[in-house]
Amino acid sequence: MNPGLLVKQFDRISDAPDAIPRLRRFVLDLAVRGKLMEQDPADEPASALIKRVRLRKAEIAKKGALRKEKPFPPLAENALPFRIPPTWSWSQIAEIGFLNPRNTAEDQIRSSFVPMPRISAEYGVSNTHEVRPWGEIKSGFTHFAEGDVGLAKITPCFENGKSAVFRGLTGGIGAGTTELHIVRPVIVLADYVLIFLKSPHFIESGTAKMTGTAGQKRVSTEYFAYSPFPLPPLAEQHRIVAKVDELMGLCDRLETAQRERESRRERLASSSHHHLNNGADAETFRGYANFYLRNFPRITHYPGQIKQLRETILNLAIRGQLTNKSDEFPTGASPQDATFSGLDIRLPAHWSIQPLTKVASSIVDCPHSTPKWTSEGKICVRTNQFRPGHLDLKGVRFVSESTYRERIQRLQPAENDILYSREGGILGVACRVPPNTQLCLGQRMMLIRAGAMLDAAFLEMVMNSPLITGIALAKTTGGAAPRINVATVKAYPIPLPPIAEQYRIVTKVDELMGLCDRLELVLTTTQRQTRSLLEAILHQALNTSHPTIERRSPFHPDIIAKDADTRKKLFLQ
């Protein structure tokens, strides 16, 4: 592998999801397949090493230091998972060491106790321990000694890669969690065994073979002891361990650089959103908006960050900071600080703020019973169909005509009425009834009809804004089954601009949300492309004779410049 190539290309691949963890797994996978280092024909072949291991194990057992092991099953040719170099041999953990050895020592001897939290999932992180008298821990725990290798066998520790070479043990011996398989390697390097136990091949294959109930699944002794184990010559084991340590150190440095860069991005993004949400006046806001647009590609790199941008847009919209042109204000007017039920919010001078119950013509709660479902009939909406600003009518359920009539007695839903979820997993989401749709309400929702002073689309936008969702989350009741009381919903503070300005705000928000959709698509596509690029560069790092990979990012300066005018127009017109 060419570490220099990885460093050179890292900026191009570091935005791939889990770039560093995937690079670490890739290194371990290559190591156990014989693809990390070139083989040296002068090395003693692994077949000869296995013979030496057998002789040494027999000598140890004969002296009575460790018990003689039972014969273990031979490997079937069709059970070998991948090809290995000619100088390597397939073996088994049970063949190259002693399984689960026991320690013998005086009770007063100081020794090491290692519970599961003291064992790291990361390669290169040493175990820690607690010092205890041997007599206190010799019974009821797993034994090990200096240089033994331990594997966590229970879920999720096994899947996470918890395993260790036990080193620095007080008194040279230790005991720990019972959820460990232990091997004491003979001649074979313990660190190479650890690389194998942490490799993606071993963990993924073992995960599929775990047995037991959910939360208590375990890797069997048979899988640990008798799975095919790719054994390199001893000299190559030393080279592999040294190379893995070198590359993991490189990963550490790249990870540090990545964290620092992401921290800078996050600080810049947070600062930008803060200033956008707290601009003192229209001119200041425009200055921050211009800065944000110019630097958007630098501070937004993940689809998840678009959510914060959407919330900022809604927050600005309901405060009159998206369309506040000078001709919209009365002469000499200045922004007002409106106080509503202890809530301070800065609004344009010609706006007001009113409780929902005063600006809605109707607010009704849903029936509190579960309807009887039918195979066809009238649509009865459920809260799992709600999305902010969108009602998903795929996979609808139906009720009979009589049930429908019963459930619309208080108010029959009409086009542009607001459906609002006040209970359950999507609490606090508003969406409008689409045109040409007859439906009734299921459970855990309310129906709100805008009054003459309110545009329905504007009300939907306000109900989904951080202002209202923040109040909803702060005032939920019900503990494990959170809900918002009807009285709380009726008291929601609704910022109220003139109706013509509501239309303009909704139009602007629709434009900006469309921009967010496009940006989210670009970022998702970029992540997918970067993931593929990561794989290509990792493979190229193994063979530098491959042609150089070229790719132009969607955030290349030429592309950014081309789209700049469109984005400025959407934000600032």
Image: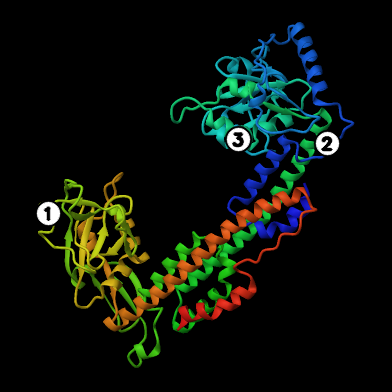
Name which of mark 1 and mark 3 comes first in the sequence. 3
Q: How is the image coloured?
A: rainbow
Q: Is residue 123 visible?
A: yes
- Can you give x and y, in whole percent of width and height, for residue 114 in the image? 61, 27
Tell me if mark 1 has few (under 14), some (14-19) or many (20+) residues whose alpha carbon lies within 10 angstroms of its own.
few
Disc 2 marks which residue? 39
* Residue 383, numbered circle: none
Please report whichever mark, 2 or 1, sits nearer to the chain's N-terminal start. 2
Count of all numbered marks drawn on residues in the image = 3
Residue 168 appearing in the image: no
Residue farthest along the front direction in this orientation: 78
Query: Residue 335, image x and y in percent?
Result: 36, 82
Q: Which residue is at a point 74% across and 55% down the rendered structure image?
A: 7
Query: Is 235 left or right of 208, judged from the image as shown?
Result: right
> Foreground: 162 or 341?
162
Mark 2–mark 1 contact, CB under 8 Å? no
CB atoms at circles 1 and 3 under 8 Å apart? no
Residue 161 tag number: 3
Secondary structure, mark 3, is loop
User: Can you identify the residue that label 1 sits on?
Assistant: 401
Instruction: Report how far apart the C-alphas of labels 2 and 3 lie in the structure.
Output: 28 Å
Residue 366 sits in quarter:
bottom left
**Which amino acid type is shown beneath numbered disc 1?**
Glu
Secondary structure state at the residue bearing disc 1: helix
Q: Nearer the viewer, residue 371 or 458?
A: 371
In-image side of 420 versus 134 (left or right): left
Q: Give the spatial CA distance, label 1 vs label 3.
A: 57 Å
Quick one: label 2 or label 3, which is nearer the N terminus?
A: 2
